[in-house]
């Protein structure tokens, strides 16, 4: 992994008190270390790009870190468009964006992300080559899905397939299934979906995102409220 320029860690006097306190909980944070998170998942609008944007936002706003979001989805450039349109409307997102929608994305992250503390890669859901390339250079994987029956039916095959590219590294990285767009969280169908993921041998992140119109409306804006994604990132940090 390339070394981050120590200057990339913003000087402590530029941080708010809340950001300083939040940072103290990041055990990995030190000059020269960069955290890479690969976000992948099933095809179709399960919420991967929304998850990627909010996770990047949490690291930028709550922790005051320098963040790059990489849109590596070869089919739809939702993250890139979100970033571009928010900026055009005068409401820019507080992190940078690159579009690297190809299987060399992992190498680009190694070679061309000096100066960032956190890199989030939205891998889309179409290409196991792209996902594998990102997973090969990442510290953590979020496999995003909604606990709907149709998605649960294919989850084991999809997870096995998607993560097989990274089989050699799977012991070194933390890979989590994350539920988003959850309706009626306490419903028995959701409990069955959680059991199914755990039964298939995967770690289910203990923090979920509900299906809320606020998150749907967030697209193409810079959300002012980090919502459930703050707790999700905090859970990810504790789980690491
Ligand atoms: N937590 C949520 N609550 C409600 N709506 C959501 C939530 N997350 C995402 N959405 C909405 O679901 C739709 C799909 O979301 P998104 O584009 O993030 O999914 P995706 O998995 O990246 O899709 P694609 O496969 O097309 O890249 C969008 O309309 C988005 O606003
Ligand atoms: Mg997407």
Image (cartoon, rainbow, N blue to C red):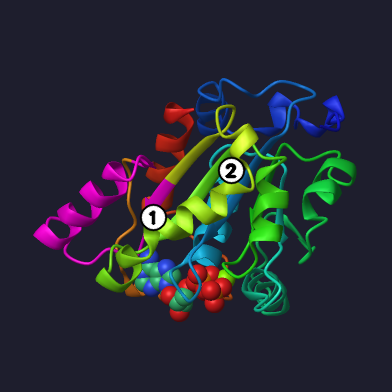
| Residue name at image x 56 percent, y 34 percent | 170
Q: For the magenta stretch, what is the residue range?
A: 177-205
Residue 171, compared with residue 234, is above or below; it is above
Count residues near mark 2 (Cα–Cα under 10 Å), then give few for <14, some for 14-19, many for 20+.
many
Query: As rendered, which of 45 and 161 lies closer to the eye?
Result: 161
**Which of the labelled discs sits on residue 59, or is there none?**
2
> Percent x, y for residue 26?
55, 25
> Percent x, y for residue 184?
16, 64
> Percent x, y for residue 227?
38, 55
Q: Does the magenta stretch include residue 194?
A: yes
Tell me which label, 2 or 1, sits earlier in the chain: 2
In the figure, residue 10 lies in which quadrant? top right
| Residue name at image x 53 percent, y 41 percent | 62
Residue underneath mark 1: 156
User: Can residue 7 be seen in the rendering of this structure?
Assistant: yes
Q: Is residue 183 magenta?
A: yes
> Percent x, y for residue 151?
35, 68
Residue 149, compared with residue 110, is above or below; it is below
Closer to the eye: label 2 or 1: 1
Q: Which quadrant: the N terminus?
A: top right
């Amino acid at each position: 992994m390339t070394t981050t320029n120590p200057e990339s860690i913003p000087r402590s006097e530029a941080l708010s008190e809340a950001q300083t306190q939040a940072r103290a909980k990041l055990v990995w944070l030190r000059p020269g270390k960069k955290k890479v998170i690969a976000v992948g998942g099933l095809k179709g609008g399960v919420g991967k790009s929304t998850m990627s944007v909010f996770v990047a936002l949490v690291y930028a706003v709550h922790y005051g870190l320098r963040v790059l979001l990489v849109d590596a989805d070869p089919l739809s450039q939702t993250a890139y468009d979100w970033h571009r349109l928010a900026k055009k409307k005068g409401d820019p997102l507080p992190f940078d964006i690159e579009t690297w929608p190809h299987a060399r994305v992992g190498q680009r992250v190694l070679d061309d992300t000096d100066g960032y503390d956190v890199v989030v890669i939205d891998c889309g859901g179409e290409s196991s080559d792209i996902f594998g390339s990102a997973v090969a250079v990442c510290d953590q994987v979020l496999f995003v899905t909604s606990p709907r029956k149709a998605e649960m039916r294919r989850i084991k095959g999809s997870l096995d397939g998607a993560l097989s590219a990274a089989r050699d590294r799977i012991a070194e990285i933390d890979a989590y299934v994350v539920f988003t767009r959850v309706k009626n969280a306490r419903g028995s169908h959701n409990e069955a979906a959680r059991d199914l993921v755990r039964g298939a041998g995967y770690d289910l992140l203990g923090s979920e995102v509900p299906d809320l119109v606020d998150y749907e409306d967030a697209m193409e804006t810079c959300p002012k409220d980090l919502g459930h994604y703050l707790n999700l990132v905090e859970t990810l940090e504790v789980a690491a």
